[in-house]
Image (cartoon, grey):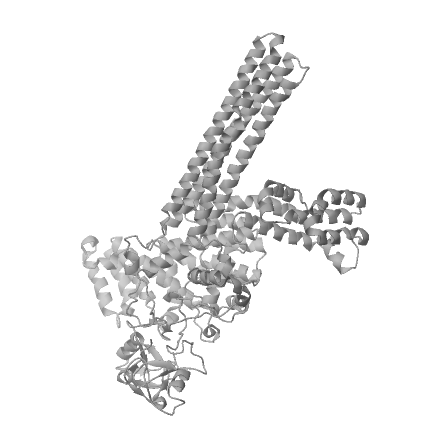
Amino acid sequence: MELNNIKDAFDRVAKKQKLSCSKTQEVIEKLIEEIGKALETIKTSSQLDDRYVLTELKKKLQELAPLSQLEGTQKELNIALSKYTKVLEKSFNPDISKAYRNVEFDSQTVNQIIANHFYRQGLFDVGDCFISETEGSESAAAMKSIFQDMYEILEAMRSWNLEPALKWAAANSDKLKENGSDLQLKLHSLQFVELLRSGSRDEALKYARAFLAPFASNRVTEIQKLMACLVWARKLDSCPYPQLLSPSNWVLVAEELTRQFCNLVGQSYESPLSVTIGAGVQALPPLVKFMTVMAGKRQEWQSMKQLPVPVELDKEYQFHSIFVCPVSKEQSTEENPPMMMSCGHVLCRQSINKMSKNNTRTFKCPYCPSDIDASHCTQLYF
Amino acid sequence: MDTLPNGNAAAASPPQTTAPTNASTTPFPKLTQLTEALKLEHQFLRVPFEHYKKTSRANHRAVEKEVSSVISGVADVADSDNFSKDDAVNHLTSLVSRLQGLKRKLEEGSRTEHLQAQKCRARLNHLESADAENLSEWNNMRLKRILVDYMLRMSYYDTAQKLAESSNMQLIYMCQDLVDIDVFQEAKKVIDALQNKEVAPALAWCADNKSRLKKSKSKFEFQLRLQEFIELVRSENNLRAITYARKYLAPWGATHMKELQRVMATLAFKSNTECTTYKVLFEPKQWDYLVDQFKQEFCRLYGMTLEPLLNIYLQAGLSALNTPYCYEDDCTKEDPLSQESFRKLASPLPYSKQHHSKLVCYITKELMDTENPPQVLPNGYVYSTKALEEMAKKNNGKITCPRTGLVCNYSDLVKAYIS
């Protein structure tokens, strides 16, 4: 985003501020000086001159007009200040709450979502603090204990300790296999490489016999490569399989473990709060734009059953198949399902009915030259 | 941002021009998306700026006040007839020391201004730093900022502080610059007092921001005065109540006569009245109402949205994710709307709207596009080529429909064209 003009506008503000500040200092100095001078004269002179000195001082200060001296710089500062506000308003969406539908969110539900978010992100202190400040519910406690286990495993992995991870994987090996995950093998490989790295070839060999051998039946090539590393045991730098030894494997395996862990405890991999806010960031610009254009229709917005504008989200926010008929532009429903024509193009049933005059004649596919017989269309299930 | 020669973002996103499911394509979809997202950050820049402006104005006002009182101090002594030499010396000396005090105060004030200006700059830099490489980190920070904003508005100050500190070490100083904990310190004092049924700090706040409140036609001060009046009536201090009304309520008569009359009537009804019109005025929830009112005024003054940012983003996000399919039994748990709590929040919200088909493979949960086109089984069930190829490879070319159990050959499949 182009921020340079905004930065310039702010620099102007800061400059004027400095100017006004030094001007003020100067004026005050001057005042101090004048009064000081008068003070000296009074102290050293005779009683008779006092009145004269004071009247002179008064006159002098009036001439100095310190306040009107400040006015000029202050005015320039004010102009810069209000200009910056305007630049901000022009460059940004000044009010994103335009797209807000006036419904009260149940704050207890929101707080529960937030507490869960803190725990699943591993922010246990923040979560505890939040629960005690909001007198939060019990349900978050369950979340906490689940994710405490996970972060203990990950924490250990960060200090190159695979013990807890291996223990967890062993305890859940059946379920992992069911999900088609080879996490166990990956963990054992890491451990094997670690042993090699520490230089004890015998121990590595022993470890491989005990823990890698059971995977031999369907992962032969991988295990062969690992075993080949034994040859380079004391000079791993020149090993032909550097990717097996890369420390980035730890990060990848930790990610896989997180994914599997979340899956087995019935949680999503991403925090649902992060996902929703991320979707919100993408949805707000078109919504705010629409509300700016349709300023008069706020009332309708409050009761709409469907968003008034299409909102395109990135693919990480696509969880369901949405079919939009390219002819009628309507989303498919159970009553109006998607139908594939003999040429492979897909329309909604209502569109096909319309084009075939209720199945009384053939029609041309809108996308290719094929002649379509409505009775030869297949309903699709996504 | 569009003009930056930054091709990385575009390269990172999948080649969308060939996808039939995505007809509308811009040359740098990721970058325009980021620009649009940054445009939502008005409050982020506005709040520290308002804070800065406020400090600067307050400093200037202090100078004006002090300087003019020094000048009139000189005039006083010059114009008065009888004063001794000592009087004059003492008087002038005290004026000088006052000016010196002002000078010190000014230096301190400009230090504060400088810090606040730095904060404004830090935020500009933070917005500028967002690019394709650090996007996920930046997004995490945004979520954190949104959450801190929520905590502050809901008066969960401890959590706000803890959350701001929870970033990794190098980022701490930065995160503090990116959230408005300092601004809310001011609100906290007023809110705490109102919760203890004290209006003085709130009134002082109104006096501080008099001109701006007047500009926005705020009646918050009037509401505070009404409450004070009610408290006098509650304690049966009727005479004082009347004096109070003359002094503080009467000036609002021109604009708020109805409310004024209603409150004055409580003198007749007293606090134990059963008459509902007046009974509510004595209820403790009036104080909660004042707190809410204050929060609104406070947010308006600093250019914040009246709703917490979290609610605004949550609502937009839930509306965009909300489809009838979210409520089916087989909804994936990656969808936030598979959870009861999210469904509850989404229930008063509209469904999303889409102009283009988006097909997600039932098996892999991946998007089906030209890269990974949808294939149809003889029974009309659709899966992605990737999933079906893998299945065929593992089972000698046989495909089993995971939803109906139908078995067929890979060669029986037909490609579907979705436009």
- Residue located at (47% from left, 76% from top): B329
Q: Position of residue B189 (x, y in %)?
A: 60, 44
- Residue located at (64% from left, 21% from top): B76
Q: Is residue A297 visible?
A: yes
Above or below, A119 against B87 in this view is below
Q: Is residue B170 visible?
A: no
Give the farthest residue toward the top.
A46
Q: Nearer the viewer, residue B162 or A209?
A: B162
Q: Nearer the viewer, residue A150 or B74?
A: B74
Q: Nearer the viewer, residue B242 or B394?
A: B242
Above or below, B188 against B285 in this view is above
Q: Position of residue B311 (x, y in %)?
A: 52, 59
Give the farthest residue toward the bottom.
A360
Determine which quarter of the picture holds residue B378.
Answer: bottom left
Apparent side of residue A337 relative to residue A245 in the rendered image (left or right): right
Q: Position of residue A71 (x, y in %)?
A: 51, 32
